[in-house]
Image (cartoon, coloured by chain):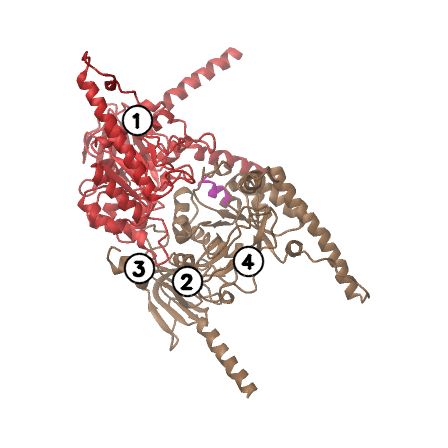
Amino acid sequence: MKKFTLAVLSCLLIVAFVFSAADPSETILIKNGTIVSGVGNPIPKADLLIENGKISKIGTDLSVPAGAKVIDASGKYVFPGLVAMMTAVGVTGYPGAGNDMDETGISTPHMDPYDAINPEDECIDVTRIEGVTTVQTVSGSRSVINGKSVVLHLAGNLVVEMVAKRYVAQIINIGAKEQNKYPSTQPGIMAYLRAKFDAAREYAKKQTQKAEKGNDQNKTKEDFVKRDLELEALIPVVTGKVPVIFITTNEVTIRNALDLIQEYDLKSIIRAQSGILKYADRIAQEKIPVIWAGTTGIPQRWEPHDLNYHTAAVLAEKGILFAFDPGGWGPGNRNVRNLTEPAAISVAHGLAKEEALKAITINPAKILGIADEVGSLEVGKTANVVIWTGCPLQGRSRVEAVFIKGESIPLTSFQTRLYDKYKKIVSDRINKK
Amino acid sequence: MRNRLIVTLSILIMLTSNLGAQDLVLKGGTILTITQGTIEKGMIVIQNGKITAVGADIKIPSGVKVVDVTGKYVMPGIIDSHSHIALTDINEATDPVTPQIWMWEALEPGSDSIKKTLAGGVTTVKTMHGSANVIGGVNVSIKLKYDRSIEELIIPGVRQQLKMALGENPKRLYGSKGRSPSTRMGNAFVARKAFIEAQEYKAKWDKYEKDKAAGKKDLTPPKKDLKMETLKMTLEKKLSIDCHAYRADEIVWIIHFCEEFGLDLLQLSHCIDGYKVADVMAEAGVFYGGWVDWWGFKEEAYDGCPYGLQILYDAGVKIVLNSDSPVEGRYLFRSAAKVLKYTEIPENEALKMITLNAAESMELGDRIGSLEVGKDGDVAVFDKHPLDTTTKCLLTVIEGEVFFDYAQESITVKGGDR
């Protein structure tokens, strides 16, 4: 009897395992949905074919390839997976000791969230089942120089399976004043950053010289450069290979970031939460992308109530490439799934719907340098596809299916499991009475 | 001469007090009454600050200002039963028991937070003491009459609520100072000790009043204690309680505690785990006050679950959506829309969570929270259905007076980039 139970159990386990490990090479045909690809107009009653994790065909009346799984999307909307910037998905973990954000130190450019990504982070499931399929996860925000950031697809059981791109940007908080130690003022931060950039340039120069001399016998003592991991992490920044995301807090920090960008010829992105419109023309002229994190912020006493709500509309009007920040970053807020919220609010206050959708799909993909892979539904791109009951900007719209790298994602999270568990517990208690 | 002055003064006072309560007709909109269905192309008449007519075919009274809201949506003014706006101070975080604190003494009618919140269609809030103390201060329910006198803001005749807070906040605050409470046991002890003392205090005063009424001579009144005065009022149910409680065990604990001491527990705030004990809450008749989808921002908030609202609803718990923040207080209607994403709760019930249920949680269900004849003329007008997340508030009316007008106060309308 025991043996039998064991056999049944192991069978069940194997079955469970096979079903849980969805096959990324599966061929899936999504039929008869309205495809809102992000390129051109929505196509009604259209089909989308996923093969080998990529979008292989988009069109009407596509034939069903042998062995393909067919998904009926009649009356539904097929959108590209949403792309969220500046999140902490994968590193926040359980509050307290589970949180791996914000390493100690004023300058920690060498911190790489890749080293701390936990594929078991509950936030991954919670986020992806609401249509966000790709995120940029950052190392922190509280220091001046915080560290690297990484782009993840929210599918996979190992970090190597999740990573779309490493070291996509360095995170510098230009307003992160220290308390009771240097740099404790805004000019102090400027001097601090200049000194770091200068040191990194110098270090880069020495490294180049060292490389050029190779095994030259005439090397002097000075040619031996001691390895400095902090400065090493800044080399791609000062050589313009990796962009800096400047976290700004107000018009002063925006101005200072713009000055530094010019002075050091940095490839940069401005993350703003206030004061951005005062520099919108300059930002447009210098073609600097913007992460707009201030939609839900409250304007100052003297400012109109809808200044922040309306800001995205102005950014779009000026032709600035911008993405919405879910506001869900940092250990305080795990609601990256609410990425659609600032987009919807902005639509209410003057932003075109198409522009709002771009700012949570293709724009962040462009800013992160992954637009050839995600951000729109186009043949050849990674199959990050979401089926919705309506426009994602509508709070009531629901996600019906999610595919990440062609893999069908179960629409469950620890929250759906909590619901199932307590629905039963509560109704059992009620029935007993 | 003196008499004439008094007469003139009283006429002046009458005039000014009448200025506040205005007459207004909103015409042509889709009226979401909350209690009596939806009226297409309806009309709502407000006279002397009160709703005097709601319907489709109503004669417009003469001499009343008429605003055409054809194609727009008209709903009751939104109510936030857990807010901290309009206050100069929030937490008397110096002692875990501070019932001597009355929040109306921190009320700032000219606070910009009122102005910014009005823009979200909100007309009434309960603005509260913070969560630093196990027993905090007495909250105050106000109408958002920006920059008027506090007498105009504070809703008259309503029973106010004492704020209590359990869990991590008092624990962390006092524990980090090496003081008690530093555990949930400590929180429980602090509350119990305070109310036991209040029972004794009340007994002394009751005896004194009884003896006095019986005509006994040479009585010395007991020593007055302001903390105990408030707790005595709470024991006498002259105040009710709104308790901040995240975890299921604490929710059950406070319900039992209030039963034990005979306290009126009206609302549980930040009720993250409420769904786990929905049946217990339903039986106690306590309102769920909380958010739709907040979770994980601290340990006791980890199990926040938007689907849980369905369990609460099915168990018969009345749900109230709160902001707890000036940010979300400006778009509570978007929170209500999210209820439709995560549950099967009907639209009108979702709207109740920011109107009638909230009103009832503040014992104002007979005055506000729906568009009915006899209720206050508190109205919010939206350009689309308020549960459409691309909508915005166009008009906020309190007792017939326009306190927010999008056309006048919007940069989107005016254009420009500054």
Mark 2 vs mark 3, CA separation in Å? 19 Å
The answer to whether residue A138 is left or right of residue A65 is right
Q: Which class describes the residues within 10 Å of circle 4: few (<14), some (14-19), or many (20+)?
A: some
| Quadrant placement of the C terminus of chain B | bottom left
Look at 80% across and 65% down and name the residue there. B214
Residue of label 1 = A163
Q: Which of marks 4 and 3 is nearer the N terminus?
A: 4
Mark 1 vs mark 2, CA separation in Å? 50 Å
What chain is tagged by disc 3? B
Q: Is mark 4 on a helix, strand or loop?
A: loop
Residue of label 2 = B379
The answer to whether residue A288 is left or right of residue B392 is left
Please tell me the numbered disc located at residue B363.
4
Residue of label 3 = B410
* Tag 1 near tag 2, CB within 8 Å: no
The answer to whether residue A252 is left or right of residue B226 is left
Mark 4 vs mark 1, CA separation in Å? 53 Å
Identify residue type, mark 3. Answer: Ser
Identify residue type, mark 1. Answer: Val
Instruction: State which mark lies toward you, 4 or 3.
Output: 3
The residues colored magenta run B305-312
Q: Color used for chain A?
A: red
Look at 31% across and 52% down and name the residue there. A309
Please tell me the numbered disc located at residue B356.
none
Q: Same subunit under labels 1 and 2?
A: no
Q: Color used for chain B?
A: brown
Decide which of A428, A306 is in the foreground and name it.
A306
What chain is tagged by disc 2? B
Mark 4 vs mark 2, CA separation in Å? 19 Å
